[in-house]
Image (spheres, rainbow, N blue to C red):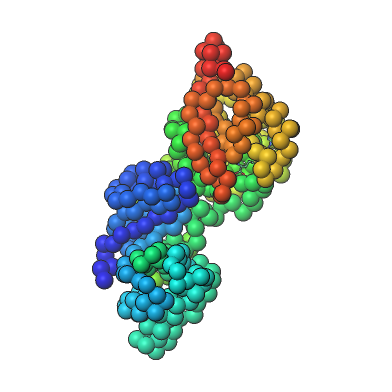
Amino acid sequence: MDIMKNTILITTPKGLAPFLAEEVKALGFPVNWTGITGVETEGCYNDTYTLNLHLRTAHHVLYLIKYFKCDSPDDLYKNVNLIPWETMLSPDEVLCVVSHVEHPSIRDSRFANLKCKDAIVDRIARKKGRRPDSGPERTCAVVNLFWKGDACRVYIDTSGESLSKRGYRKIPMDAPMQETLAAAVIMASGWKDTENFINPMCGSGTLAIEAALIGINKAPGLMRNNYGFMHTMLFNSEVWTDIRKKAIAAIRRPIPSEVIATDISMDAIDAARQNAENAGVKDCIKFSTCDFTETTIPDSSGIVVINPEYGLRLGNVEELETVYGGIGSFYKHHCQGYRGYVFTGNTKLVGKVGLKSKRRIPFYSGQIECRLYEYELFQGRQQERSQI
Ligand SMILES: C[S@@+](CC[C@H](N)C(=O)[O-])C[C@H]1O[C@@H](n2cnc3c(N)ncnc32)[C@H](O)[C@@H]1O
């Protein structure tokens, strides 16, 4: 087995793969395949450190260990047991096996996990005289099994816990947007750090915090200190320290534009401020507690992004119709010269905004189909022409 250059599969939620592919390319890696929930690239084990540290829209960076044909649980055990795990996993490490299995011989994927785990620990016990412990937490060495039809792939999950857990959002508040989704929404808007970023209804502050992180060029992975890749014998701590130091040196402050986050709830603003402090970007964001219509919109240009409640999980639909109507009027009267965005999972409510959207970008928030609506908010008379 070549532990140097291998296939690396990077997973992401539905809807984010095009943004992930762009990020992978921008980091200088080839994109060999793009699917609905992942992007395939290639690289050596050490390259997974860079991907884990810098990617804003990835969830798991999976380093391929072996591909084989597999038609039964016994086949699985035999093939996994042939992998030289003793060169990769210490018996002192804790092992977690996770899987996605679609094969008629497996009714419960936990059985496949168990077979795979037994094959690994039996091999290590045979070679080293001791077997590693195993458990369900992804804070240790994580092996990911993807078995579909007769094709089976075994990966090391170099991320461990999902990269969407950046570590800064200690206070999530109601209906927070996942960090990776917020980053993709910002990428979809085409926001540049020379433009103002205004986020009324900021809730826990995810959108403003992700914008500030992008604005200061801070790698999202700098806020985490535990990754799956650290728990294997392939880990090179000197290379990791060097990659991390370079990422710290690449941070540039201040952001040349304004990032403003407001919410009607004082608790939300307190939480957002605390989350921003955890992310190291509190000084980059101006927070205030107010109704969204009172948000200060500085002269010049930029984007205004609003993620209102959409009545599926929170809020009352009739009240929300008034809120969405208010967003349209706020955009029309106070945000001229900006681009306005509404991120929502409710296509009926968004009609109440009453402005013609220029683009509708599809996303998912969990299982809920959502859209990012873009409104061009022209100055003066052009604004009137943009209405429906
Ligand atoms: C869906 S949450 C936003 C979640 C946010 N994107 C996050 O990641 O945490 C909607 C937010 O809008 C706020 N809100 C509701 N009505 C408001 C109003 N009239 N003016 C300002 N904020 C409002 C709520 O307090 C809530 O925090």
Q: Can I make out residue 210 in this image?
A: no
User: How many marks can you see?
Assistant: 0
> In this rendering, is residue 150 above or below 250?
below
- Towards the viewer: 356 or 380: 356
> Which residue appears at 65% of the width and 29% of the height?
324
Give the position of the N terminus as an image quadrant.
Answer: bottom left
Q: Can I make out residue 387 in this image?
A: yes
> In this rendering, is residue 288 above or below 226?
above
> Which residue appears at 47% of the width and 71% of the height?
106
* Quadrant field for ligand 1: top right
- Towards the viewer: 309 or 173: 309
Judged from this view, the residue extending furthest toward the top is 381
Give the position of the C terminus as an image quadrant.
Answer: top right
- Towards the viewer: 201 or 118: 118
Quadrant position of residue 124: bottom left
Expressed as whole percent of the image width and height from the top left, the position of residue 312 reads 66, 43
Expressed as whole percent of the image width and height from the top left, the position of residue 77 reads 39, 78
> In this rendering, is residue 272 above or below 342?
below
Expressed as whole percent of the image width and height from the top left, the position of residue 353 reads 62, 26
> In this rendering, is residue 176 above or below 87?
above
> Which residue appears at 70% of the width and 33% of the height?
320
> Which residue appears at 49% of the width and 80% of the height?
133
Q: Is residue 185 left or right of residue 296?
A: left
Expressed as whole percent of the image width and height from the top left, the position of residue 221 reads 46, 54
